[in-house]
Amino acid sequence: MDYLLTEEQQMIKETAREITEKKVIPMRAELDERNAFPTEILQDMAKADLFGIFVPEEYGGFGGGCLDIVLALEEMARGCVGVATSYAANALGIFPVLISGSKEQKEKYLPDIAQGKRWAAFGLTESNAGSDASGIQTTAVLDGDEWVLNGTKQWITNGGEAQVYTIIAMTDPSKGPRGATMFVVEDGDPGFSYGKKEDKMGIRASATRELIMQDCRIPKDRMIGRRGTGFITVMKTLDISRPGIASLGLGLGQAALDEAVTYAKQRVQFGKPIIAFQAMQHMLADMAIQVEAARALIYAAAKHIDNNPKNMSKASSMCKVFATDMAMKVTTDAVQVLGGYGYMKEYPVEKMMRDAKILQIYEGTNQIQRNVIGQELNKEYS
Amino acid sequence: MKIVVCIKQVPDAKDVRLDPETNTLAREGVESIMNPFDRHALEEAVRIKEEHGGEVVALSMGPPQAETVLREAISCGADRGVLVSDRGFAGADTWATSYTLGNAVQTLGEFDMVLCGKQAIDGDTAQVGPGLATQLRVPFVTCVQKIRTIEGKSLDLERMMDDGYDVVRLPIPCLLTVVKDINEPRTPSLKGKMKAKKAEITVLSAADIGAKPDCIGLAGSPTRVVNVFSPPPRGDRTVFTGSAEEQVDQLVEQLGKYI
Ligand SMILES: Cc1cc2nc3c(=O)[nH]c(=O)nc-3n(C[C@H](O)[C@H](O)[C@H](O)COP(=O)(O)OP(=O)(O)OC[C@H]3O[C@@H](n4cnc5c(N)ncnc54)[C@H](O)[C@@H]3O)c2cc1C
């Protein structure tokens, strides 16, 4: 379907697609097998200016919005959700600076991010604080001109690979969620190190690692926004980043559909290509409906968000849930269409199905998204 | 460093067929692309500019629609595009093309380097690079696989040979033709694409570059195509596999059939 994208948006799609086809698809099986971080591919993306999409023009980027990122991520995810996750986590990691950072912080970090000279990561989750983010135990205490951070963040995408980390810590534990503040921690800061690197079911090209802060000292001016506004920044960040995760589901679903239809036209059983069987056709039709519906919802949500409305949580959560549940279903069905071949690593749908699962979990599980939507409905109808 | 890169728009080789009736290339419906070797020349020029500063000018001789390859060149890092286009250029052979490009380069003013692809995939002659160098009266090296160093007005490079490579030093200004091994061309960047969309392509006519009418196009071309034909297919070939010993055994067995 034609979504009447602007010429610039077409260029973003084309550029992301070209890198996906030339660099990502030929490498994805190996990256998956070796659990290897796609440094070179990300550098190629940077050279093609893809890291600048969401950075304002005054800091050397394109000043694009949510829809622009979503379009790039959709194309990347058609190739590999692991690679695309590394890109998405970079955006997620720098959004707090974009949303709540000072002018000095923006000047310091954004031009480097736009050029891909430095990568970012977002540190919220801890061993005892997953869905319930308010349970974080990392602390930050002001000591003269420095903040001293203590605690461990877990499962941080781009951990160990990024140079810039936005991290939330309790500055006033007695105030509960209003006592949390965000900071920028840089690779090489004293007391900052990396822990365990995870061995995962899917998105194996992405790095997921522990961040350890042991009396980690950072200058005072690394605080993002005002003291106590950490969770507000986190919520705003996730509102604009979730359509990106939705788009990973969209690109993945589209790729699985492409594989399934191509295969169904070639595979002959009972003397006919299997696409001639109505049961197969209906399955493919349902996959196509789901993919297109997800696309329409994501683009609409992204445009809504780009319009800077007062409340964007519901739209953001709705597209995240719909598109990622779709991706799980469609990739599972794609494996079914390919039968035993689909279960083998020789065909890409096996990896696609493994990669799909994470999308229902990270950046807020789909249960949590439904909670958000439910709470919003409750408010709307009061 | 001012570098001129010569770029030709060619039919996509994947689609090329010979019209069996007329023995000419059937170009209808065939997509036009940037000559693949020229893409490597352009990439090398852009890399030199990135390291040493300067300007990269993409130059093409061709019909008005050749403008698209110049825009593409800008999206890949060229600073500007110049198209020499004139009805009088039609039918040019490699001599007339070299003459025309030579006049165009001189019209653009002083330069440090001219980079060309080794050959164009449609004509496959590999003559225009050397021809152009001769017109410009600068030294040239063909089939460059690597530029080692650029220091002041001197250039060290590797020329690909069948059995290895030569290391050559030559002065600037000069002309090089490059092979594909020299680099891996980049994907056009977003900023490049936006710039290319807005760029003004300079178009120069035969008069603008001071070309003599009897030196351009068909009239200026000493080459005459007497006959074009498809070469007969080669005979059957067998490729032996396995260890050297096994291969020799197979060869001896095959030869035995002829003794
Ligand atoms: C590969 C990977 C990458 C990640 N990258 C990052 C990152 O870059 N930065 C970062 O900060 N975090 C990251 N995370 C963490 C991720 O966001 C969390 O895993 C996620 O928020 C869920 O938390 P949890 O795993 O602790 O699950 P839990 O919160 O323990 O949830 C377990 C189950 O209980 C359900 N549940 C919990 N509470 C409720 C409720 N109130 N109502 C209904 N159901 C509920 C959940 O939906 C889930 O099904 C990553 C995780 C993974 C696996």
Image (cartoon, rainbow, N blue to C red):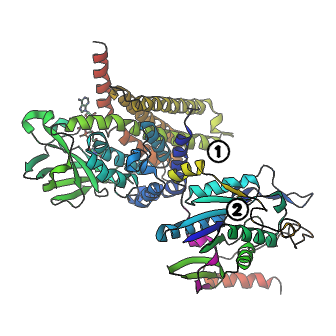
The kind of residue on which mark 1 rests is Gln
Task: Name the amino acid, label 2.
Answer: Ser
Horizontal side of residue A353 vs B171, given as left or right: left
Left or right of A135, for residue B224: right
Query: Label 2, on which residue?
Result: B60
Indicate the quadrant containing the C terminus of chain B: top left, top right, bottom left or bottom right: bottom right
Q: Position of residue A28 (x, y in %)?
A: 47, 55
Quadrant (top left, top right, bottom left, bottom right) of the N terminus of chain B: bottom right
Vertical position of residue A320 compared to residue A8: above or below: above
Q: Residue at x 45, y 36 (%)?
A: A67
Q: In front: B124, or A365?
A: B124
Residue A218 vs A250, above or below: the answer is below
Does residue B8 appear anywhere in the picture? no
Instruction: Name the residue tied to disc 1.
Output: A266
Q: Position of residue A229 (x, y in %)?
A: 19, 36
Does the residue tagged 1 have its C-beta within 8 Å of any atom of ligand 1? no
Residue placed at 47% from the left, 44% from the top? Answer: A72
